Amino acid sequence: MTAKEAAAMRFATAAFGIILACCLLCPANAPAAQAAPPKFALALAASAAGRLDDALAAVEQSAKSLGAAYKELFRATPAMVPEDRGRLLQSYAVKDGTVAFRDLQGPCGPDPAAKAPCQSLYFYDGENFSDNLFRELAALGSLAPAMAAGYGALPYSWVYLTTPDQGFAIYPTLPLVEAVNNYKPTDKDFYTAADFAAKACGWQSPYLDLAGDGMMVTVSCPVYDGETLLAVSSRDVTISQLSGRVMADLAAIPGARAFLMNRRGKAIAVSDPRLAAAIDAINAKAEEAVVYFRADRGLAAMGLEKAEDSPDDGLNAIGEAVIERAETEKKWPMAFVSGKDMVLAARLRATGWHLVLVMPQKAVN
C-alpha cells in the first residue's frame, strides 16, 4: 500500500468514526437507527479488516514469489563443481547436529551478528551431505538477492526456505547458536503449516517470538515442480507491524476499543496499551502465547493444558459471544449489542481471524 493510499484509508476510518460518534449521540427519537446497526458502522469493521487482509495478502504473495524464484533457480542449477563444494566444506561449523555454511568472503564475514543483512545457510542432518544437498545449497545461495529484496519490500522479521531433506536458507542473518532451535525444520510448525494437499499457502497459528519480537505469525507456501516438492517458502509477520496502524485508527474513535483474535479466541492484538502490556507479561512468563479472549466456559471446552483468559472480563465475554455467534451466523461482518456497547466483528479472509470493534452505545431512555 502506498503512502497516499494509507493516508486515504486512515482518513476514511476517522471519517467513519466521526459519523458513528454523532449517530451514537443522537436523541432518543430516532427508532430507525436503533432497530439495526447502521450500514456505515458495518462498513467500518469491514474496511479495517480489509486493510489487514491486504497486508496479509502482500506477505503471502511475497512468499509465493520467492518460492517461484527458487524453483527456477533449482531447475537451472547443475551439480556443484568440486571447487565450490570444497569451498563450502572448508568453512562450515557444526553445533548439535546443525551445520552452518559460512561465507568467508561475504560482506558480513564468517560470523555475522544477528539480523545482519546477509543470508544464512544451514543443514539439519549433521555431516550427512549428499550431491542433491549441494545442488540445493547452490540454488539457495543464488536466491540471496531475491530474499534481501523481498525482506526490504516488506520488513517483517524473517524470510526463509526449507527443503525436504533439511536444507535451510534464511534472511537476515540467524546465528548458529539460535539456528539450532529449528532442528529439524521439516518437523516445525512453520513447515507443516503449508497446505501440501492443496499445494497452497497456509498460515501458522499466532505465536510468541522468544527472541523478543512479540506476537508473530508465519505464512508457508509449498514449492512444487510438477509433483515433486522442492521446498517450503516462509515469511514471518510481526503482529505489531501488521496491525498497529489499524488498531490505532480504530482506537481513535471516542470510547472505542479493538482486538484481534483467531477463531479459537487466542489474543493476537489489542488497541488498549495497558491491556496489551498485561497480555505480553502473561505470555512472556509462560514463554508462549497462552492468553485468550474467552469466558471460562470457552476455555474449559477447549481443554488446553496452557490457556488463560485475558485480564479484561468484558472483552472476554464479547470474544466468547463472537465465537459462539460465528458458529451459527454466516453473515460477516456481524453486529450485536452487549450491555452498553455496540460490537462489530469482521472475519479476515486469509487467516479466519476475527477483528472485533467495541464502541459505547448511547443509552435510550
Image: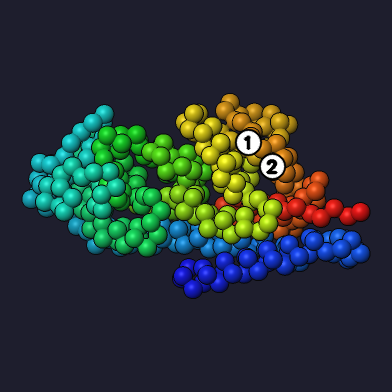
On the rendered structure, is 34 left or right of 165? right
Badge 1 is on which residue? 310
Nearest the eye: 227 or 334:
334
Question: Are the residues flagged by discs 1 and 2 in contact, CB closer than 8 Å?
Answer: yes
Image quadrant in which the C terminus is located: bottom right
Q: Residues within 10 Å of mark 2 (few under 14, many from 20)?
A: many
Nearest the eye: 356 or 78:
356
**Amino acid type of disc 1?**
Ser
Q: Looking at the rendered structure, which numbered label has been put on residue 315?
A: 2
Nearest the eye: 220 or 222:
220
The x, y position of residue 243, in whole percent, is: 53, 54
The x, y position of residue 227, in whole percent, is: 41, 54
**Residue beneath the point at 69% across and 53% down:** 255
Query: Which quadrant would residue 46 be assigned to in this image?
Result: bottom right
**Residue beneath the point at 64% across and 28% down:** 303
In this view, which residue lies farthest toward the left? 83
Label 2 secondary element: helix
Question: Which badge, 1 or 2, is on the more N-terminal residue?
Answer: 1
Residue 211 visible in image: yes
Nearest the eye: 7 or 323:
7
Q: CA–CA distance between discs 1 and 2?
A: 8 Å
**Residue beneath the point at 46% across and 70% down:** 3
Q: Residues within 10 Å of mark 1 (few under 14, many from 20)?
A: many
On the rendered structure, is 189 left or right of 138? right
